[in-house]
């Protein structure tokens, strides 16, 4: 089934993890919002609301991540553990899903996405995370019970974005413990985290590093700044061939030029970043062809 998505999007990543949990293989179709792909006639025909994620399963089309996740579980799940059929258990799962959709994720998005950075005005977000902490008091999973549900998966994708954006989850012991536990057991967790990291990579590249390395004076670049970028890239590239998908992209070509500039400045010992060196060598080779 075709899955229209952005890797940095928490709702998209929630669907990917749900699909992995029920054993469904998605055919990923990257949608470039900057190019207006979501407004092209062929996409509008599928989804007049032109939002992501969007799932196409034969002649059935659905959007809104939590609706898609429920559909995948009900249509392809082997049992009802991810989305219980017992009315009261299901009601709690639904409440947590609605909490994520209407409170937790929007409060983060409101302060983070305008500038792609956390502001100092965290009171509303702190209140939402404190509520999640109460939900988890004495519980292994966000909706209680003895097993993972789609509510855990949806909120896990949201909280992963909080984590990579630099929000201090350790202030909330129940949330932090739950986050660490689930990161070891939820299918597709590694890809989920990498998608969240990709959003931060885009932010730092275009807002910080691109202006400094390609527009400003390279003499202004200090070694600590370069090390920060290289550490991030080395983590991001673990097990990856390319930055944005299964083939070389404009992003790969631009970032490798920046790595070349860092090496030329000789401000950092590059041998500590094996993933970066391997990836950069591959991109240079492909670019020359």
Image (cartoon, grey):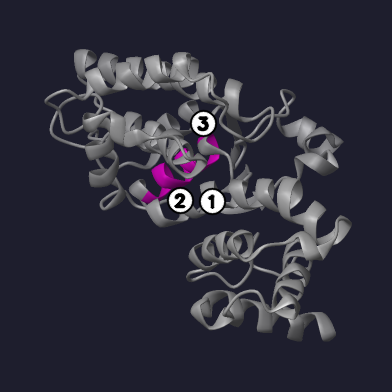
Residue 243 is tagged as: none
Residue 65 is tagged as: 3
Graded by Cα atoms within 10 Å as few (under 14), some (14 to 19) or many (20 or more), the crowding at tag 1 reads many
Q: Earlier in the sequence, mark 3 or mark 2?
A: 3
Chief secondary structure of the magenta portion: helix
Image coords of residue 272 (percent x, y): 49, 78
Above or below 13: residue 45 = above
- Residue drawn at point x = 64 percent, y = 35 percent: 116
Stretch of the chain drawn in magenta: 11-20
Image coords of residue 78 (percent x, y): 27, 43
Q: Is residue 18 magenta?
A: yes
Graded by Cα atoms within 10 Å as few (under 14), some (14 to 19) or many (20 or more), the crowding at tag 2 reads many
Q: Earlier in the sequence, mark 3 or mark 1?
A: 3
Q: Which residue is mark 2?
A: 193
Q: Is residue 67 magenta?
A: no
Q: Secondary structure at mark 3?
A: helix
Q: Which residue is mark 1?
A: 197
- Residue drawn at point x = 40 percent, y = 19 percent: 126
Above or below 20: residue 43 = above
Image coords of residue 100 (percent x, y): 42, 22
Mark pair 1, 2: CA separation: 6 Å
Mark pair 3, 2: CA separation: 17 Å
- Residue drawn at point x = 46 percent, y = 55 percent: 191
Residue 188 seen in this snapshot: no
């Amino acid at each position: 089934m075709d899955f229209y998505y952005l890797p940095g999007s928490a709702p998209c990543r929630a669907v990917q993890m749900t699909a992995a949990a029920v054993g469904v293989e998605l055919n990923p179709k990257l949608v470039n919002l900057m190019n207006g792909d979501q407004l092209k006639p062929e996409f509008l025909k599928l989804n007049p609301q032109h939002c992501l994620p969007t799932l196409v399963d034969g002649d059935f089309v659905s959007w809104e991540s939590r609706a898609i996740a429920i559909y995948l579980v009900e249509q392809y799940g082997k049992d009802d553990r991810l989305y219980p059929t017992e009315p009261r258990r299901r009601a709690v799962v639904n409440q947590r899903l609605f909490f994520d959709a209407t409170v937790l994720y929007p409060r983060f998005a409101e302060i983070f996405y305008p500038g792609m950075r956390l502001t100092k005005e965290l009171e509303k977000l702190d209140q939402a995370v404190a509520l999640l902490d109460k939900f988890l008091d004495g519980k292994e999973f966000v909706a209680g019970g003895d097993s993972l549900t789609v509510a855990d998966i949806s909120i896990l994708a949201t909280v992963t974005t909080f984590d990579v954006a630099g929000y201090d989850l350790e202030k909330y012991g129940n949330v932090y413990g739950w986050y660490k536990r689930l990161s070891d057991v939820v299918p597709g967790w590694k890809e989920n985290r990498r998608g969240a990291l990709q959003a931060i990579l885009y932010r730092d590249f275009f807002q910080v590093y691109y202006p400094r390395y390609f527009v400003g004076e390279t003499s202004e670049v200090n070694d600590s700044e370069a090390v920060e970028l290289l550490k991030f890239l080395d983590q991001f590239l673990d097990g990856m061939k390319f930055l944005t998908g299964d083939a070389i992209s404009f992003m790969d070509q631009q970032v490798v030029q920046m790595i070349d500039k860092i090496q030329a400045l000789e401000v950092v010992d590059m041998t500590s970043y094996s993933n970066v060196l391997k990836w950069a060598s591959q991109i240079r080779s492909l670019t020359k062809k």
